[in-house]
Image: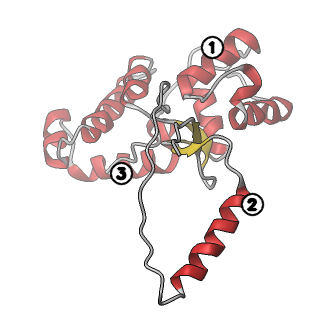
Amino acid sequence: MPNRENCSLLELQTAAKAAPIQRTNLRLMAIKALTMAITHEQVAVLFGVNEDSVSRWIRRFNDRGIDGITEGPRSGRPPKIEPEQSREYSELILHPEFVNETHWTGRKFHGYLTEHCKLEAGYSTLMRWIHEEGFRLKVPRPWPDGQDEEKRKAIVGLIRKWMSDQNIDLWFLDESGIEGDPRPRRGLQQKERRYFSLTAGLISE
């Protein structure tokens, strides 16, 4: 099945509308249908292709995202992202707080670069660069703000000591928190890095 972390349904829809040729539009819409739990057989019948073609599109999409199934002429001069820009953009993706953002999606990042950094590259070019640089859309894990790593290590040591004591029964109670600003569903992050979203919680003693 298509890897849904490569892009959202909205991004697939946007790319399909901007597709330079009909074949690309068809492939993108087929991938969208598959992510909506429509079977291979139904997609093949719906778009008038064989199942091998559908499987091939899925492999290309999982390897390279939208650009893996995009082909044909592009309008205008193909803009490039220079090495100096690459370093700057990578830092922005890793540190959205530098520009008062909490996270990035492909559309959000392209809009910011176009408005504030005078980026001339189109959306598909930027998304191709994002995948080449090893970034993916990932769901963040909630992580309480203000964690004290030294205290965490100390309590882990105590727990291990207590667990080895036959005279101590350990009971665990899960904590609860209240979030006024829920974590984003997905944001851009390097493929190999764990992605956290800081959250504030209420603690009672």
Q: Position of residue 16 (x, y in %)?
A: 39, 23
Label ID, residue 150: 2
Q: Nearer the viewer, residue 116 or 2?
A: 116
Q: Nearer the viewer, residue 62 or 102?
A: 102
Q: Residues within 10 Å of mark 1 (few under 14, many from 20)?
A: few
What amino acid type should be assigned to the residue bearing mark 2? Glu
Mark 3 or 1: in front is 3
Q: Which residue is mark 3?
A: 56
Q: Which residue is mark 1?
A: 76
| Residue at image point 74% right, 11% down | 116
Q: Position of residue 5 (x, y in %)?
A: 45, 43
192 left or right of 10 in image: right
173 left or right of 120 in image: left
Lower position in the chain sequence, tag 3 or tag 1 = 3
- Which secondary structure lies at badge 3? helix
Find the distance from the CA under tag 2 to the CA under tag 1.
Answer: 56 Å
